[in-house]
Structure formats: C-alpha cells, structure tokens
Image (spheres, rainbow, N blue to C red):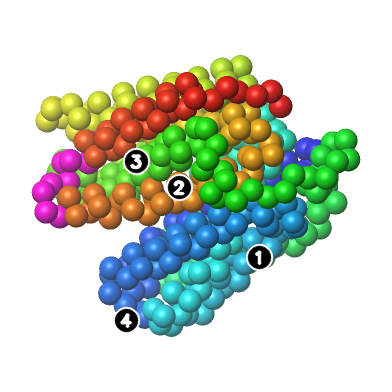
Amino acid sequence: MASLLLAIVYISFISLGLPDGLLGAAWPVMHLEIGAPLSAAGLISFIITIGTILSSLASDRLTKRFGAATVTAVSVGMTAAALFGFSVSSALWQLCLWALPYGLGAGAVDAALNNYVATHYKARHMNWLHCFWGVGASVGPYIMGAYLTHTGVWEHGYRTVSLIQTVLTVFLFLSLPLWKRPTADSDGAPASPSVGALQVLRIRGVKELLLAFFAYCAAEMTAMVWSASYLTEFRQLPAEQAASLASLFYLGMMIGRLISGFVADRVRDKNMIRIGIAVAAGGITLILLPVSADIAAILGIFVFGLGCAPIYPSFIHSTPVNFGEDYSGAIIGIEMAAAYAGSCLAPPVFGLIADHISAGWFPVYIALFFLLLIGMSERLNRLVTPQHK
C-alpha cells in the first residue's frame, strides 16, 4: 500500500507540471484568435502566480484541517476545471477569470505534497518527485504542440490536459484511505494547531530560508524564460536552434534530480545544496567566458540546470529536520510563496535590462541571485541546529 501511495504522489507531481508550459506553447496562436495583445500572457501569468501565493500561505491551515490527501484531490480538481475553462474561453477577461482557480489549485497541491513527502519519505523521493514534475512540464507543451501541428486547435490541448487532471482527481479521491491521517500523530495525539505566517517569521533562520528560496527561484525562472533569448540576441544563434538548445536547462535539471535521488540519503540535504550551488556556479562561469565559440555558453546552460537540480528539493526536504514537523507545513507553505514571488518578479526585471541595455547581462543577473543564495544558505546553516525526525 505504501508503494501504491508513493506512485500516486509521483503521478500527482507529473500532473502538477503538465499545465505549466501550456500557456507559453499556445499563446502565439491563442492571442491572435481571442484578439489579445502578445503582452497579455504576462497578465494571465501574474494572476496565476497571485493565486499560487495565496493558496501556499493557506496550505498549512487547510492541510491540518482537511488532510493532505483531500487538499491534493480538491486542488487537482480545481486545476482540471480551470484548464477546461481555458479551453472554452474566447476573450482575455475569461482567461483571467479562470487563471485564479488555476493558481489557487496549483499552489495548494504544491505545498501540501511537498510537506507530505518531506515528513514521510527520504531525500531520494523528494528529488525524484521533482524529477517527475520535470516530466510533466516537458510533456505538457508536447501535447499542445502536437495539437497545434496537426489540427491548429489550441483548445484541444487544454481540454486533453484537463481530462488527464480529472482522471487523476478521481484516483486521488479513491486513494483517500491510503493516506496517513494528518489529524493525529503516530501515537494518537492530536495534531499540532496551524501556525500563522507572522509566528513562523519569528523562528530563527526562517527569514534566511525564504530569501534563499526567493533567490534560487528568481535565477531558475530567469534561466527558463530568457536562455533562448540570450542565445538569439547576444550569441546570434537562429531562433529555432536557440529554442531547442534552451531546453538543455530542463534536461540538466531532470538528469540531475534523477542522479540526486540515488545519492541524497547518503550525502545529506545540506551537502546536496552545496554541491548543487558549486555545479551551478560552474555553469554560470561557462556562460560568462569571453570566448566567441558558442559551445561554452550552450554547455553552461546544461551545467547550470544540472547544478540547480538538487537545490530546491533539498531545501524542502530539510525543512522538517531543521525546524520540526510541527512547523514544517506552515514554513513550506511560505517557502512556496517566496519561490513564486521570485519566479514572478525576476524575469520581467531582466526583460527591462535586455530591452534597454543588453541580453548579454543574462549570466551576470543570475550570478547575482546565486551570490544571495550562497550567503543566505550558509547563514541558515549557522543559525539552525538540525533536529532528528
């Protein structure tokens, strides 16, 4: 039964990644059909991000009241409904309306599942869990691209992913008896009450942890959004070639998380984070090398993704150990909010830099966030004494 539940959790994370690339893949066609400006994708993404932040902050209270399984099932159901809403939308205001439940569902399931795995499974499962997210994030745009190529109908892409999410929702509700009840601990005592955000921020080391999350996700999302443009605008590669080469970042992350899963239990979370940062710094250095050959920058994008791979899962998995299981749900919810804030704010700022200065500042920009990450990560190590589960 434990193996079956773990499989359901993995599939849930594939489901979490599936919708992430749909808007970017479909928008070049969508915005023309609904008469929206190209820039409106930013508005939709912003509304989704606001929803994810709100639900992340509320996730601990919801999980302790209803349980991780119920929160996950309802959240995936909300996402399924929102994706279907996207598929029947014919105006920008309708997409903006459906973007809110989309974000609310995504943020709640992200925080609930991350905390569940962090408190019930070993580090290798956390790394593999996020590897499965990468599978979903890669498959989603493929589904949309197949429909656009063969039928030209973007609505079918959203509808197909909505159907997949609906089927998963049914399985999640059927699996409710498999999940360990969060309302009581192993010896039958009542679960700890939910903790407010202000109370969590007073805990020693939490502010440093949140800044580390913000910095890491700012660098990661900047790489996801701007790698192709850097290769095109600064390295002068053809757009179609740059788009393919930018996917090396995703490939590096998936390979890195797969490998990390085999060694994480022995190496420990703190060391996995340090190794990841060192490898990612090597990738940034390769991109920064002042050489005319493009191979260094291309390899650097892959190595940067490889280094990023263990950082996010290891930070999450270490949260119950560093701060205790009573606080882990609330802290992970706020971690998700800090992560989404970094992901939301950093790429548009670099867009202004690319427009008004040069896209060549891309490696410098992500390097600055990594310097902040290094400082906060090492300060966190000094402030926090890990607890035994």
Q: Residue at x 47, y 21 (%)?
A: 382
Between 134 and 332, the one nearer to me in the picture: 332
Tell me the tag on residue 77: 1
In the rendered view, tell whether residue 100 sits above or below residue 124.
Answer: below
Residue type (three-letter) at the residue carrying disc 3:
Ala
Q: Amino acid at mark 1?
A: Gly
Question: Which region shows up in magenta?
Answer: 355-363
Q: Which residue is mark 3?
A: 219
Query: Residue type at mark 2?
Result: Ala
Query: Which residue lies under the disc numbered 2?
Result: 338
**95 on left or right of 261:** left
Q: Is residue 218 left or right of residue 269?
A: left
**Residue at position x 36%, y 44% in the image:** 218
Q: Are marks 4 and 3 in contact (CB under 8 Å)?
A: no
Mark 2 or 4: the one toward you: 2
Viewer-closest of 150 and 140: 140
Q: Secondary structure at mark 2?
A: helix
The residue where tag 4 is placed is 35
Horizontal side of 341 relative to 242 (left or right) equals right
Q: Earlier in the sequence, mark 3 or mark 2?
A: 3
Q: Is residue 247 shown to the viewer in this render?
A: no
- The circle drawn on residue 360 is none
Q: Position of residue 373 (x, y in %)?
A: 37, 32
Give the distance between the C-alpha atoms of the residues marked 3 and 2, in whole angstroms: 13 Å
Q: Disc 4 and disc 3: Cα gap in Å?
A: 32 Å
Q: Secondary structure at mark 1?
A: helix
Between disc 1 and disc 3, the foreground one is 3
Q: Earlier in the sequence, mark 1 or mark 2?
A: 1
